[in-house]
Image: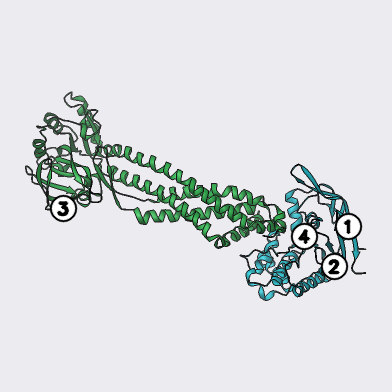
Amino acid sequence: MGRTFTQIAAVTMMNLRSIPDRLWTSLSTVIAVAMVTAVLLGFLALANGFQSTVQGSGSPDVAVMLRKGSGSELNSNLTREQSLLVEEAPGLARGADGKALVSPELYVVVDGIKKSSRTKANLPLRGLGVRANQVRSGIKISAGRMFTPGTNELVVGRAVSRQFEGFELGRKIRLAAQNWTVVGEFEAAGSVFESEIWADVAVLQGLYQRGSSVQSVRARLDSPASLEKLKAYSEADPRLKLDVQAERSFYAEQGKGMSDIILYLGWPLAIAMSFGALAGALNTMYASVDARMREIATLRAIGFGGTPAFVGTMVESLLLSAIGGVVGALATYLLFDGISAATLGSNFTQVVFALKMTPQLVVQGVVLALVIGFVGGVFPAWRAARVPLLAAFKEQ
Amino acid sequence: MSEALIQLKGVTKSYTRGKQSVPIFERLDMTIPQQDFVAIMGPSGSGKTTLLNLLGGIDKPTGGEIVFDAKRMDNLDESKLASFRAGNVGFIFQFYNLMPMLTAAQNVELPLLLTKLGPKARRERVNTALSIVGLSDRARHKPSELSGGQQQRVAIARAIVSDPKLLLCDEPTGDLDRETAGEILSMLQTLNRDLGKTIVMVTHDPEAARYAKRMLHLDKGHFSEKDLAA
């Protein structure tokens, strides 16, 4: 066993030391594998970033209530009576004045112009109730101030002001045939709220002729466990019959569809590209075996077995692919990690998010690279193990 | 007459080319005594290298028996043949067949990796082998930093480092100038005379063959012998 290991180590070292003799073919394999890894990780980082942004948006102690079966805020519609009934529900947190922390909200879509492409994109304009600030936690006005209720004032998420034209602090902008003034910019810990524009719900109700109806009601719970009480309350009253969800699970559900689409695009594309890299790896490793044919045959003539030749070739292939995988992961991290992207969320509005690399994603990329290295190495390694000994006597 | 190291008894060897069988030897008999130094000559295609491969356990005969040190070896499986080669045979090739990425000492050490020797014992054996071929001062040089003659001396050191009984040389001076060839052949003579190595050398060169004790001429699958020592 020890001798076999010594033989394997010796042959493997010989293989690795001879890589500089085949620098360009080896390099082409590394680059091909790096590109495949980078493409896969780019998509995974995209999906991961989107998922983190959307799923990180929710709070477990905020309840979102929609019309039963509506599925999203855009499709929902709730009456003023229903909003008022929610305020009487048990398990809700209450303000200093003893009133429930509830925010009836309107959610409409307006046009924005992307700074990057100068194309139109849908932006969510959310009308907030007067207690919205107390309902939501983790919202911070980073510049300017909150809008004044009853006026055409807006506050915009940080992502909106960065990615879309005309939303800088103090700018006047025309939305929904009305002039608005941007009076503040807010941060929401990188969540989906940073892709929203907020205004007073009453102003929007008038503007969009919604009367006193809203699309969703948010309520702060006195604890996450109180969600069940709220659900029971809603089910018990025939005037309500709402879909009640914790905000966290609401956004987790909303984000899953899109991140699944990104994943379903990313993996097949990476696998298709893998075949190209595989061809490169096979070519490199066959070239490596052919170049060392006489050396391998000489070792066999001396008395070495076929196993060291097999393992040595496999190690070379796996090493080249692993280097490619690490280079690809590093390139993805340096080029894409943290950069902003925007795509349509579940409400057909833009969600701005940052691509996010994680160690788990790097592991997935390197595993794909190693699979390419394994498949690309196994056939040439088999050839190496079966090199005819007579090749030792031939002139190269 | 010394005891036989190798005996070929009615050895037949043929290759299949397409659907045709091409015979190389038909019922070839041969005996090589211990400590012999035999040169095998013959025209191209006469089967000299094939014979060397059969003697070294690199190729198997189609028929007949090959006996090495009183044991049949023609019926060994691939793994046992590899052990046979590792323990009994040192190969010296025309183009040296050194590993270009290894130093002279590392090349010489290769056969010892197949033994139970530890690193220290291996190092000592390598130093001894290199001193025998007069290359102790080139131990850390790579083949590309050595002349053709020096490379062949490293190959000889590699062939003798595990102390095999038999050295098989395939045109060992075919790639060298006359003077260097003489040095290499003298070294083979020394190994035969002083260390008792049995040497079988295939060569085209009558001058090289003169360094052997006897010469066998192989043609059309048969030997004719000439005793050079006489």
Q: Nearer the viewer, mark 4 or mark 3?
A: 3
Q: Which residue is mark 1?
A: B223
User: Which hue belongs to chain A?
Assistant: green
Location of residue A250 with respect to B108 vertically, above or below: above
User: Which hue belongs to chain B?
Assistant: cyan
Classify mark 3: helix, strand or loop: loop
Does label 3 lie on the same chain as label 4?
no
In 3D space, how far apart are the residues under numbered discs 4 and 1 (Cα atoms)? 23 Å
Asked if marks 4 and 1 touch (Cβ < 8 Å), the reply is: no
Host chain of mark 3: A
Taking the image as shown, residue A255 lies to the left or right of residue A240, namely right
Neighbour tally class for label 3: few under 14, some 14-19, many 20 plus, Cα within 10 Å: many
Neighbour tally class for label 4: few under 14, some 14-19, many 20 plus, Cα within 10 Å: many
**Residue A168 badge:** 3
Does label 1 lie on the same chain as label 4?
yes
In 3D space, how far apart are the residues under numbered discs 2 and 1 (Cα atoms)? 16 Å
The residue type indicated by label 1 comes to: Phe
The percent position of residue B49, horizontal first and vertical second, equals 78, 57
In 3D space, how far apart are the residues under numbered discs 4 and 3 (Cα atoms)? 85 Å
Taking the image as shown, residue A15 lies to the left or right of residue B89, namely left
In 3D space, how far apart are the residues under numbered discs 3 and 2 (Cα atoms)? 97 Å
Neighbour tally class for label 2: few under 14, some 14-19, many 20 plus, Cα within 10 Å: many
Q: Which residue is mark 4?
A: B89
Q: Which residue is mark 2?
A: B212
The residue type indicated by label 4 comes to: Val
Asked if marks 3 and 1 touch (Cβ < 8 Å), the reply is: no
